Image (cartoon, grey):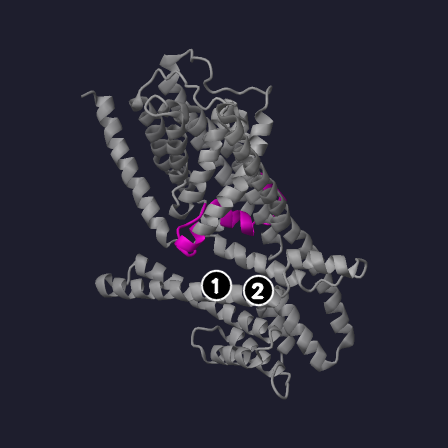
Amino acid sequence: MKIKRLILIILTIVAIAFISFSLISSVTQPQIQNRLELYQTNLLLHAGEWEPKDLDSKNFNLASETLIGNNSSQAGLIQYKNARNFAQKQLEKQENKLQILSLEEGITAQTQKFNDNVNQLKSLINEFDINIGILQVQNNQINSARENWQNLTKSKTASQPLGETAKVLIEIWGTPAKILPDAESLIQQNLDGWFRYHALKELYKLQEREEALGELHNQEQEIAKQAVLKLAIVAGVPGIGLVFGVGLLIFLGVQWLILGKKSVLLKNADLPWEVSWNGETILQVFVVGFFLVGQIIVPLGLEIFKSFTNLQSAMMGVRVQAGYILGTYVLFSLGGFLVLYLSLKSFFPFSEGWFKFDLRGDWFFWGLGGYFVALPMVILISLINQQLWQGQGGSNPILPIALNGQDGLALALFFITASIAAPVFEEVMFRGFLLPSLTKYMPIWGAIIASGFLFAIAHLNISEVLPLAVLGIILGVVYTRSRNLLSSMLLHSLWNSGTLLSLYVLGSGNS
């Protein structure tokens, strides 16, 4: 056996072990979806306060019910209770693990990490409880709200300011109502957004401060107006695309039933590629280009760089983090492309159809159409997936940073990473190289499915495997039908851009 082949076998085994470990580890990591749902709930609560004076009331009510619903505070109460229940389950799991580790190992770095997680979850649950109380008041459940806040005042895990704020709320909505000292400052400091607005509104009513009440109302109306616009972007625009995508799917299905192999959906479906290399070359590109370069060489090089420059992740601002992520991805991509080039240079020139970039033709319509088709299919799988994983399974690490990074330059850097660099690199590797290479060993439809699942697994988050596999399969269909990498790159870019836009809008509504 050649040394090169032996090294490749060893690296393949290590890569499979690493990927398996990463997927298993992601099982216990929270998804960003839970945070997104709460962020959207906060927008709904603000939007429910909007009282436009210059719109036809009948048309406004119809549009409002479609976008916001009949009772935003009731929907918000359900969502916050669900989030609280999920956090409680997570807390119980973390406490059990902490107890087991403490008995087995004593105080270690790992037990300290679990202890920090436990404290963070307790703090989060306390914040949920105080907000749930305000939502209960809005739904005429005042006794339940007072009981919630009373428990907070007795809780050993609640911070003193939060406990004092709970006492203020108990008295504001008491019978008779009372105003405690520092009530306004405690509300301002310890409540956010819609919850702060409603607590201050009740306080100003009790204090009979009409001018402050009017100013507060005007401020909330401006926020509510912006919230409606943001909801229209994050819910309305995808909703329109969803409807169009369902219509397009029906059209393509009917055309396929009528025209069979002559339908648009089956264009180039059986047209093979001429593959000159074997499975060893495929493994070499992905094991060396993806695993060795992406998971060992680039991260190790960056860690050495950080140690020399004393650059710590916790010290990075959002702009530095965004630039660091872009730089990391560019280095990873260049390394992957170099491995791809070195692996295939002995097979130059390629036969027709390989790595095709052609600005002519119908690539734009394939990419755009593929995006609309992907919307309903991926959303459906994602809804099923959420029920399966119940908020766990991990998420792309870029997403939380992008959600919290309300900075124009940082957003531009995230956009370059997610909407330009990632589509170019991943489409060349997965659709341009892997999918056609697999057709040497399986039919085209099999290569589409296999490359789609490998594309999903490469993201190393187990909860994202099914949705990303569906997206990868659609990307494969678009590429095999158009035979132009620009089409799948466009679809990929549109998908990532839509995700980034939603994150930015939701984050700006909760900053």
Whole-percent x, y for residue 28 in the image: 36, 54
Instruction: Check if residue 458 falls in the magenta segment.
Output: no
Q: In this orientation, which residue lies closer to the viewer: 416 or 311? A: 416
Q: Residue furthest front?
A: 258
Name the residue nearer the viewer: 484 or 2: 484
Q: Position of residue 324 (x, y in %)?
A: 49, 40
In the rendered structure, the answer to whether residue 363 lies left or right of residue 456 reads right
Q: Is residue 307 above or below residue 156?
A: above
Q: Is label 2 in contact with label 1 (beta carbons under 8 Å)?
A: no
Q: Amino acid at mark 2?
A: Ala
In this view of the protein, can residue 25 be seen by the observer? yes
Between 445 and 90, the residue placed more toward the observer is: 445
Question: Which residue is pictured at 79% across the width and 58% down the height?
Answer: 56
Q: Residues within 10 Å of mark 2 (few under 14, many from 20)?
A: some
Residue farthest toward the right in the current orientation of the protein: 54
Secondary structure mostly seen in the magenta stretch: helix
Using the numbered discs, state the Cα–Cα distance from disc 2 to disc 1 in whole angstroms. Answer: 12 Å
Of the residues under marks 2 and 1, which one precedes in the sequence?
2
Kind of element beneath mark 1: helix
Outermost residue, bottom direction? Answer: 176
Residue that extends furthest to the left in the rendered view of this protein: 1
Dot 1 crowding, Cα within 10 Å, few <14, some 14–19, many 20+: some
Q: Give the residue pinned by disc 2.
A: 75
Question: Element at badge 2?
Answer: helix
Is residue 153 or residue 314 the one in the foreground? 153
Residue 485 at least partly seen: no
Residue 189, given in percent of the width and then of the height, sits at 60, 69
At horizontal 48% and vertical 70% (from top left) the residue drawn is: 126
Disc 1 target residue: 83
**What range is drawn magenta here?**
385-412
